[in-house]
Image: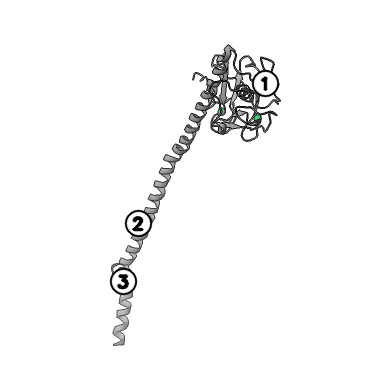
Amino acid sequence: MTTKVLPATSGAADTPGRGRTAGAAGEPGRTAAGVRGFTLMELLIVIAILGVLAVAFLPRIIGGQEAAKISETKARMVTVQSIAEAYARKASRGYYPPADFTDPEGKAKPRADANNAGIESFVYFTHQKSEGYETLEGRLDWLVNTDGDDNGAPIPLLQTSKKMEVADGWGNPIAYFNSESGYDKPQTYVDVTGGTQTVRAARLPGGGHLAPRKFQLLSAGPDGKFGTEDDITVPELPR
Ligand SMILES: [Ca+2]
Ligand SMILES: [Ca+2]
């Protein structure tokens, strides 16, 4: 009896592979492997889909935010432009707001430093008293003071002596140039990061000044740097 049992045991040991593959041990092995493989595939597919979604939509979200800031900046610049035009029409002045704090009528003697002078001068002269045209009154959230200076005396229509710069959509001051104050004189602007930038009046592709005998508004655009391709100008530069 014992001698028959031993060969039977050794017989089973002769075909261990077949016995395990076809037997109870084989099917659970396949099932386990199948479940793991499928789960890994699912994970990979989910990761792949997330990757595709990120690639597809992140630039659109970021691009959409930038587009909104560009639109906001243009809207502000057009408002500033209309204020400048109205200032020139008022009482048949015939000149645009000064960009260097020099009062053509010799009355105002504002305290001013060299930074952000163009736009500060614009805001100062266009908001000294009720001029009877649209002003930045009611748009105080557009105003910033990136160079941290103080005009010394309140600007009546704006109830401030400090916030004299109109910001673009990224918080940087919009630069203002007046041809009479000089397109050839670069201006110094302190940007929203506290850095200082030299800003030059925009030129046409042919080399001439944009809006000769008028005025220019310049935004550093999305990259925050003046003088680069993404700058926004009013009037618009031909591309
Ligand atoms: Ca300032
Ligand atoms: Ca730029």
Query: Which quadrant of the picture is home to ligand 2?
Result: top right
Name the image quarter holding the N terminus: bottom left
Q: How crowded is mark 3: few (under 14 residues within 10 Å), some or many (20 or more)?
A: few
Query: What residue is shown with label 2?
Result: 38
Q: In which quarter of the image is residue 52?
A: top left
Residue 128 image position (x, y, % from top left): 63, 23
User: Residue at 37% across / 53% down in the picture?
Assistant: 42
Q: What residue type is labelled 2?
A: Phe
User: Residue at 29% across / 80% down in the picture?
Assistant: 8
Label drawn at residue 134: none
Label drawn at residue 101: 1
C-alpha separation, residue under disc 3 versus residue under disc 2:
31 Å
Residue 181 image position (x, y, % from top left): 64, 16
Q: Nearer the viewer, residue 106 or 180?
A: 106
Query: What residue is shown with label 3?
Result: 15
Q: Can residue 147 be seen in this view?
A: yes
C-alpha separation, residue under disc 1 versus residue under disc 2:
73 Å
Q: Residues within 10 Å of mark 2 (few under 14, many from 20)?
A: few
